[in-house]
Image (cartoon, rainbow, N blue to C red):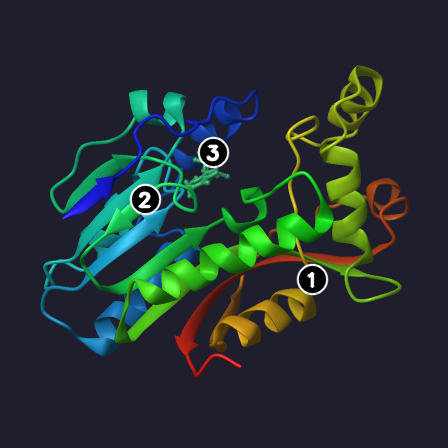
Amino acid sequence: MTTDNNPTAKLRKEESDEKFIEWSKSTSETTYDVVALANNLKRIGHKAPTGLDIGGGIGTYAKSVVASCPDQDVRITVVDPGVDANEQRVEADGVDYVLAPFDATFDSDEKYDFIIFRTVLHHLIADTESDTYQTQLTALTKAKSLLKPDGFIFVSENFYQPWIGTDTTSRIIFAVTSCKAKGIAGLARRLGANTAGEGVRFRSLQAWTQIYDRVGFKIESHDLHPWWGGVMPFWQKLPLLCKDRYQAAQILTQTEAS
Ligand SMILES: C[S@@+](CC[C@H](N)C(=O)[O-])C[C@H]1O[C@@H](n2cnc3c(N)ncnc32)[C@H](O)[C@@H]1O
């Protein structure tokens, strides 16, 4: 049974949600990160694997994964606090929904075979850099506690590799996008930041790997998006001190927490 044990906790309604919902509608059985997860489920071969899709939005990702594994009775619960996504969610056999922020209020007495974070980890933020680190660490720790012993995490994220330091670009993006001042948020939006005024905390591959290691996960596979990232123009890269940006789908398996 999955529950939202505090239904009054803060739901989400942000300006950027409309764009995410439009983007999510294009997800299908041929999308690279649907293929990556479906292949892993088929390889493991459980008859009826159950999963959570944290921040799964309107459910097109979960629906596509279920449809990609017709010989397995895959069941996925989408956990998302988005009010707009909730209104537009897709109905599909094997997919159900909980309207709740995962980190704050979601609770379950079930253990899962897999837990998905598809372009979601960078939305789990707090007011400061250190509280944001703690929020992301706590979400992954909570996910680990909801996994079966042989369960795995599926992450699809945008990674920003800086010219200097280990995580400089993502720190700059967080500082700019979380700034609420109208002038700066407006400028950031014009420069291409959908989440200006809301805040997003991406990380480099090295920075995520350190968090995974602390929680007790190791990267089992790392599939690069076939084309995403190369389109970032030089004039965007330069002020962000960004050397490289790409999206990848990762399977994380459990180790002992350090
Ligand atoms: C970029 S969208 C990705 C949607 C979906 N995963 C997909 O790939 O189609 C980010 C999603 O994270 C959700 N989100 C934000 N904060 C969350 C939280 N605390 N718990 C669960 N989901 C959250 C948003 O509501 C939004 O649907």
Relative to the observer, which residue lies in front, 125 or 248? 125
Q: Position of residue 216 (x, y in %)?
A: 47, 76
Q: Residues within 10 Å of mark 2 (few under 14, many from 20)?
A: many
Residue at image position (82%, 56%) is 168
Q: Position of residue 102 (x, y in %)?
A: 39, 44
Disc assigned to residue 204: 1
Q: Which residue is mark 3?
A: 23
Say if disc 2 is inside 8 Å of ligand 1.
yes
Circles 3 and 2: CB atoms closer than 8 Å: no
Q: Label 1 is placed on what type of residue?
A: Ser
Disc assigned to residue 105: none
Q: Secondary structure at mark 1?
A: loop
- Mark 1 or 3, which is nearer the eye? 1
Say if disc 1 is inside 8 Å of ligand 1.
no
Say if disc 3 is inside 8 Å of ligand 1.
yes
Q: Which residue is mark 2?
A: 106
Numbered marks: total: 3
Left or right of 52? Residue 191 is right
Name the quadrant where ligand 1 sits. Answer: top left
- Mark 3 or 2, which is nearer the eye? 2
The earlier-in-sequence mark between 1 and 3 is 3
Q: Residues within 10 Å of mark 1 (few under 14, many from 20)?
A: many
Relative to the observer, which residue lies in front, 221 or 54? 54
Q: Position of residue 215 (x, y in %)?
A: 50, 71
- Mark 1 or 2, which is nearer the eye? 2
